[in-house]
Amino acid sequence: MAAKTAQIVYVSNIATQRKAAGMTQRELAIALEMTEASVQNWESGRAGVTHLQRIVALCELLDCPVESLVEIVPAATDDAEITYISHIKACRKARGLKQRQVALSLQITERTVKAWEKGDMGLEAIAKIIQLCDIFQCPIQDLIQPLKSKVTK
């Protein structure tokens, strides 16, 4: 018989933070340069909560604030794009962790960790999370909250 483990289920706390900041979904969407539907999906938990949960876990594992993970480099000209520089590898190495250890802790693949470190994936989403924390003046942990424990086999 397989052992049962408790898994914490998280819910989005973004709506609470947005309302505390006195913002509408539309205002938040404009500030983040994303669609209002994306904000609605984050708030309802239809999208983004799992990603937020992983980023929170990554910050806790690396013992660093979310702002340390990605550097946002403003566009040099109006027609140029914003670029993102990953500092995840430096944070990981400073903690003496291997990519495999990070992957196992976050229940993701090593390929995902490598992609984050190279800047091939996920940096724009992390940058949006950094912007959310700046707008709401809160740590990343305040964007999600544990709802309940779910027992899995």
Image (cartoon, rainbow, N blue to C red):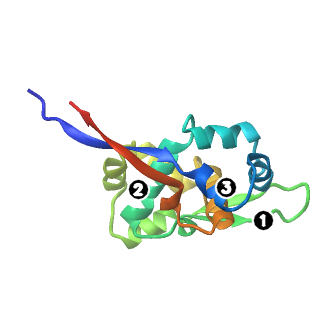
Q: Which mark is residue 74?
A: 1
Q: Which of the pair 6/63 is nearer the observer?
A: 6
Q: CA distance from mark 1 to mark 2?
A: 27 Å
Residue at coordinates 72% horizontally, 36% vertically from top-left? 37
Mark 3 lies on residue: 19
Neighbour class for label 2 at 10 Å: few (<14), some, many (≥20)? some
Q: Which of the pair 38/120 is nearer the observer?
A: 38
Which amino acid, by three-letter code, is at mark 1? Pro
Q: Position of residue 105 (x, y in %)?
A: 32, 52
Q: Position of residue 70 (x, y in %)?
A: 59, 63
Q: CA distance from mark 3 to mark 2?
A: 25 Å
Neighbour class for label 3 at 10 Å: few (<14), some, many (≥20)? few
Q: CA distance from mark 1 to mark 3?
A: 28 Å
Q: Quadrant of the C terminus?
A: top left
Q: Is residue 127 visible?
A: no
- Number of the front mark, 1 or 2: 2
Q: Earlier in the sequence, mark 1 or mark 3?
A: 3
Mark 2 lies on residue: 57
Q: Position of residue 85 (x, y in %)?
A: 63, 62
* Disc 3 element: helix
